[in-house]
Amino acid sequence: MAFAEFDLIDSYFTHRQPQRSDVVVGIGDDGAVLNCPANNQLVVVTDTMVAGVHFDQHVPARAIGHKIVAVNLSDLAAMGAEPAWVSLALTLPSIDHEWLTGFAQGLRDICEYYGCQLIGGDTTQGPLSVTVTAHGWLPQGTAIRRDGAKPGDWLFVSGALGDAGLALAAQQKRIRIADDHYRRACERLFMPSPRVALGQSLRGIASSAIDVSDGLVADLQHLLKASHVGARLSLQELPLSLAMTESVDQQRAIELALTSGDDYELCFTVPESRRGVFDTLVARSASKPTCIGRITSEPGKLKLELDGEPWQLAQPAGYQHFQTTTAFEHDQ
Ligand SMILES: [Mg+2]
């Protein structure tokens, strides 16, 4: 394939792009030139999605365009950052105009919604894979990090957990669920909503945060490790959707909520001293995070309790990636 054909791909991404005033030079030159606001810090995140690993050939291109930006914005949200710019590296086996139109639309729509601008990228020929780097801003010194949790802090999670895993389990016919529940769960799997507004509002309130991309247990353990603390989870408090509670029993629902990936909710800690400010904030906001436990002083120790009784995960720890790797391969 001629290089010129790949150059044409740029036209898919320059069309109807949202324009930010801080972009001096965007797509079309060797590099982007960007104005940086004074007294802010730049936050940079990158995520890759590979065909056959993170998605299969049945996933619509528009959903892939949406999701690759969403997962990056979810990382920015976990830091408390305001998204500004994204760049794209796209590897395609061949030029498929229908696929490119859908992909570009998904990418453009989510960028427009969150006010970010695509500022450049690269296109190459090879097995299908998409990488996005997102840039966001934080007022100096306000980053919400993984290492700030302290014993006694309250542990919260946004939204509902496990729906993406529920969709995948239904898709693989491991469980049977009603059509409308399946549609809603698939929406969570393919078109996730990063918690951008919540992340920013937690600056100065949350002592630590992480986004739930690999499953609550796996991601919470990263936070506990970084903060040198433990946690006690009250599993009866886990936020579950109606699709979840009406489709599977409590044991299965808890397992999905704890271990299935792709939720893109925020898991964060709030010190007792900020609890009042936090409660006031969420009382006025659309997102209603749920308190699911408390931080303890035992480093790395995650205690799971259901109605006060100890609870064991049926699956071994570290098994969390099965949903996004081998699972799709079984389906093909
Ligand atoms: Mg993350």
Image (cartoon, rainbow, N blue to C red):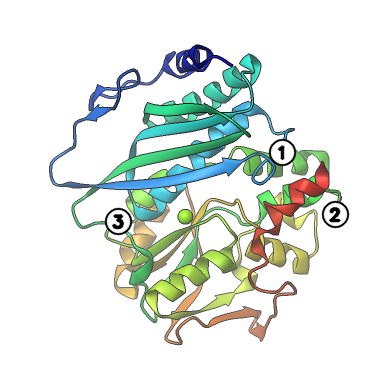
Residue 56, numbered circle:
1
Q: Residues within 10 Å of mark 1 (few under 14, many from 20)?
A: some
Q: Is residue 83 left or right of residue 170?
A: left
Closer to the observer: label 1 or label 2? 1
Rendered location of residue 186, percent (x, y):
70, 41
Q: Is residue 233 above or below residue 68?
A: below
Q: Which of the pair 4/85 is nearer the observer?
A: 4
Residue at the spot 19% in from the left edge and 36% down from the top edge: 36
Identified at 39% across, 34% down, the residue is 86
Q: Earlier in the sequence, mark 2 or mark 3?
A: 2
User: Mark number for residue 174?
Assistant: 2
Pick whichever, 84 or 275, lies toward us.
84
* Residue type beneath disc 3: Arg
Residue type marked 2: Arg
Mark 3 CB within 8 Å of ligand 1: no
Contact check, label 3 and label 1, Cβ < 8 Å = no
Q: Which residue is labeled 3 in the image?
A: 203
The vertical placement of 169 against 156, above or below, is above
Estimate the x, y position of residue 161 in percent, counting from the top left. 61, 57
Asked if residue 293 is positioned above or below residue 330 in the image, the reply reads below
Q: Nearer the viewer, mark 3 or mark 1?
A: 1
Amino acid on which the number 1 mark rests in the picture: Asp
SS of the residue at dot 1? loop
Question: Residue 280: image x %, image y %?
Answer: 35, 58
